[in-house]
């Protein structure tokens, strides 16, 4: 067993060296680590030791199975595919309690997970079996700077909580679009927001972080010139939770009050009009070039008793009180008799727009994202829609409660330029190289666990077909957004064609020198 541990660890070490990592543990250190793991016994036994130590030192923060709080925290996730059975739940209410608890978990060498809002539909990214689940749900403190320019927010709340706090002050931050998305996960993963055309990714607007490192050290990190932890500041802009547990984000604010927008749903007959409007919007000189506009267009297929039903959707936002903003005119011109729901209007508070999406926040279904990106033309927009709809009908007609969506998320050159102007991030997109494209999601929702494999296969097959077709047209983009990825996808390898991996490894080796987080913290995606 020790030999197996060492061979796997040595393989990882050689891989990291090939990627440019530095300061790796020596072979003797690896031997010692492996021996200690064996001496401490089975992972479940180590987790039991960690839970017992937490219960003794921090009893008010530790919850065992069958307790109401254990059930609440272990099951309160967006996708039922991610409900797991941790040995205990650790729910610290202060940073010092988290720091102390992490040291106890490290001493026991227990596996653990760190959960913010629980929205990522990747099993194991936010919970685990037979380990310690750390919930950030009580880390919810908010503070606004004296000049109102910076909002400091805790990771354990949803974006709707943050928006509701700032809106009465006439302020906003660039965060998640759906009300149930958690603050922490989105802000370490990248973050597409309603205001990204002018603000860039959500991570581009973080100016400071409070981070608990592997050994319990609490570190303050900023974007300020000369900050001794500038390497960590960059790595936290899309590098996920590879480097530490973030307990506070300091975000730039900007003024927003009213906005035009909301959710519109059209019948299947409006499909050509919706896809035509999207094609015009994405074309050079189209609405996508206005940095203030935001849309998310998607085709939605539901199958009930083997019968498919197709609808089209758009979530739009344009700040201000203009009831007919020009960038959205092709959508607002679609015939009223093909409109099933029209929530698009001037909203006194822009926060009414994410509130309209509450129906997508149900936590009773099984969900899967699968990311695929491409340049938008009439042909690529149509083939993306056709491939997903046709495959869903052919492969998933027997899946109970199925809803599948072909989601189009525009990423404009202006969006990427705003990101670059703020210093860039781990995602590695270049406005002059990547330009304007669609970051697509093949999104599926269903009811029963026995259909999990079929839905994943459908997603993989559809994505591969879309890739092959868009590659043949010269329209494929390798970008795989972590926040929209499925287990098995490799987003970090797609960022800047993998060129950022050595820099991320260097940061990880500095801030997790003993590979504690690498070995014990569960996450959705490897740094590969």
Image (cartoon, rainbow, N blue to C red):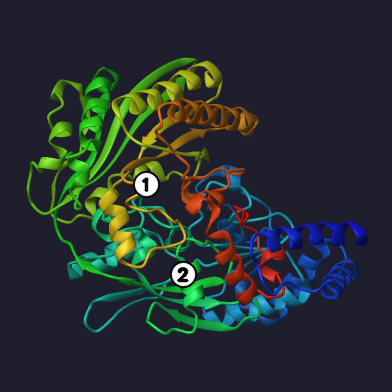
Instruction: Please state if 28 lies on the left or on the right of 168 as rendered.
Output: right
SS at mark 2?
helix
Q: Residue at x 60, y 52 (%)?
A: 525
Could you tell whether 21 is left or right of 395 in the image?
A: right
According to the image, label 2 marks what residue? 234
Q: Residues within 10 Å of mark 2 (few under 14, many from 20)?
A: many
Which is nearer the N-term, disc 2 or disc 1?
A: 2
Residue in the image at 43% along x and 29% along y: 470
Relative to 174, is 321 above or below?
A: above
Image x and y of residue 84, in percent = 65, 51
Which image quarter: residue 97? Answer: bottom right
Quadrant of the rendered structure where residue 342 is?
top left
Percent position (x, y) of residue 131?
72, 61
Residue at image mark 1: 434
Q: CA distance from mark 2 to mark 1?
A: 21 Å
Q: Please give left or right for residue 179 compared with residue 316 in the image.
A: right
């Amino acid at each position: 067993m020790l030999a197996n541990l060492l061979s796997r660890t040595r393989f990882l070490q050689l891989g990291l060296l090939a990627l440019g990592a530095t300061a790796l543990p020596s072979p003797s250190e690896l031997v010692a680590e492996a021996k200690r793991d064996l001496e401490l016994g089975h992972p479940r036994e180590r987790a039991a030791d960690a839970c017992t130590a937490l219960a003794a030192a921090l009893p008010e923060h530790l919850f065992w199975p069958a307790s109401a709080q254990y059930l609440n925290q272990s099951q309160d996730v967006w996708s039922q595919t991610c409900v797991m059975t941790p040995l205990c739940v650790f729910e610290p209410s202060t940073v010092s309690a988290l720091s102390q608890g992490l040291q106890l978990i490290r001493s026991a060498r227990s596996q653990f997970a760190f959960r913010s809002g629980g929205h990522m539909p990747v099993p194991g990214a936010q919970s685990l079996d037979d380990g310690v689940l750390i919930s950030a749900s009580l880390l919810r403190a908010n503070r606004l700077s004296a000049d109102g320019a910076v909002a400091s927010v805790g990771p354990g709340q949803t974006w709707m909580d943050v928006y509701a706090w700032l809106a009465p002050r006439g302020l906003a931050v660039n965060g998640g679009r759906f009300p149930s998305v958690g603050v922490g996960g989105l802000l370490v993963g990248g973050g597409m927001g309603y205001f990204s055309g002018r603000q860039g990714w959500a991570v581009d607007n973080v100016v400071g972080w409070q981070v608990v490192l592997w050994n319990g050290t609490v570190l303050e990190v900023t974007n300020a010139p000369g900050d001794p932890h500038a390497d960590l500041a960059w790595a936290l802009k899309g590098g996920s939770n590879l480097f530490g547990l973030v307990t506070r984000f300091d975000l730039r604010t900007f003024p927003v009050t009213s906005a035009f927008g909301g959710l519109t749903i059209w019948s299947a007959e409006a499909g050509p009009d919706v896809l035509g409007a999207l094609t015009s919007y994405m074309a050079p000189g189209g609405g996508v070039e206005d940095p203030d506009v935001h849309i998310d267009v998607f085709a939605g297929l539901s199958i009930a008793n083997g019968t498919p039903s197709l609808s089209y959707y758009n979530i739009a936002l344009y700040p201000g009180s203009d009831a007919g903003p020009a960038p959205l005119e092709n959508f607002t011109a679609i015939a009223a008799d093909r409109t099933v729901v029209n929530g698009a209007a001037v909203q006194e508070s822009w926060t009414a727009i994410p509130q309209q999406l509450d129906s997508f926040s149900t936590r009773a279904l099984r969900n899967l994202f699968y990311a695929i990106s491409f340049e938008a033309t009439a042909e690529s927009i149509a083939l993306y829609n056709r491939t997903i709809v046709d495959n869903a009908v052919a492969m998933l007609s027997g899946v109970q409660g199925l809803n599948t969506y072909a989601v189009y998320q525009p990423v404009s050159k202006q969006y990427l330029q705003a990101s670059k102007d703020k210093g860039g991030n781990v995602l590695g997109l270049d406005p002059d190289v990547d330009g304007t494209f669609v970051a697509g999601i093949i999104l599926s929702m269903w009811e029963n666990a026995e259909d999990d494999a079929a839905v994943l296969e459908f997603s993989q097959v559809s994505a591969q077909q879309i890739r092959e077709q868009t590659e043949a047209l010269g329209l494929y983009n390798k970008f795989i957004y972590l926040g929209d990825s499925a287990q098995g996808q490799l987003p970090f390898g797609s960022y800047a064609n993998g060129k950022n991996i050595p820099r991320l490894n260097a940061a990880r080796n500095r801030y997790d020198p003993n590979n504690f987080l690498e070995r014990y913290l569960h996450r959705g995606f490897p740094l590969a």
